[in-house]
Amino acid sequence: MVDIFSKKKRSEIMSKIRGKNTKLEMLVFHELRKRGIYFQKYYRTEFGTPDLTLPRKKIAVFVDGDFWHGYQFSKNKSKLPKKYWQKKIQDNIDRDRKTRKRMRGVGWKVLRVWEHQLIEDFDNTIESIVNFIA
């Protein structure tokens, strides 16, 4: 499948995709702070960089985008335009799995929240994060 954009335009589009401080992450951060929950954003651990962390309690929460982190990847894999993207997403899935396993192995509590969960039911998803932290 041929890209409909020039290399320059595609580069411009891709440069606007954020890995940190996405709109959904910012909404989650704002809501948790509003509730008096103090955390660190993007705290570096030896295993990875969770989106929000309570280091003393060893609690980490990942807010993962459906596309980039492979939600229902096996079902949607054939829709991806190139082998590059299939490998890219599969590598992300493998890295995420390894990171969570290693963190849990040294005593961290890890929660993963999907983009679609926040979009479909923001309030209940926030409650699940609050309950997880408490």
Image (cartoon, rainbow, N blue to C red):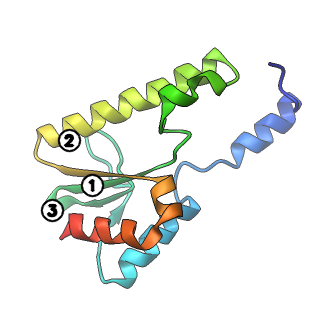
Q: Earlier in the sequence, mark 3 or mark 2?
A: 3
Q: Amino acid at mark 2?
A: Met
Q: Nearer the viewer, mark 3 or mark 1?
A: 1
Mark 3 and mark 1 in contact? Answer it, CB < 8 Å.
Answer: no
Residue 36 percent location from the top left of the image: 30, 83
Packing grade of label 3 (10 A; few <14, some 14-19, many >=20) is few
Q: Which mark is residue 60?
A: 1
x, y (%) of residue 127? 32, 72
Looking at the rendered structure, the number of numbered marks drawn on it comes to 3
Mark 2 nearby-residue class (10 Å; few <14, some 14–19, many ≥20): some
Circles 2 and 1 in contact, beta carbons < 8 Å: yes
The residue lying toward the viewer, choosing from 59 and 93, is 93
Residue at 39% x, 55% y is 51
| Residue 56, label in figure | 3
Mark 2 secondary-structure assignment: helix
Q: Quadrant of residue 56?
A: bottom left
Q: Nearer the viewer, mark 3 or mark 2?
A: 2
Q: Residues within 10 Å of mark 1 (few under 14, many from 20)?
A: many
Horizontally, residue 56 falls left or right of residue 116, namely: left
* Residue at image mark 2: 103
Q: CA distance from mark 3 to mark 2?
A: 14 Å
The quadrant the N terminus occupies is top right
> Residue at horizontal 45%, vertical 31%?
92
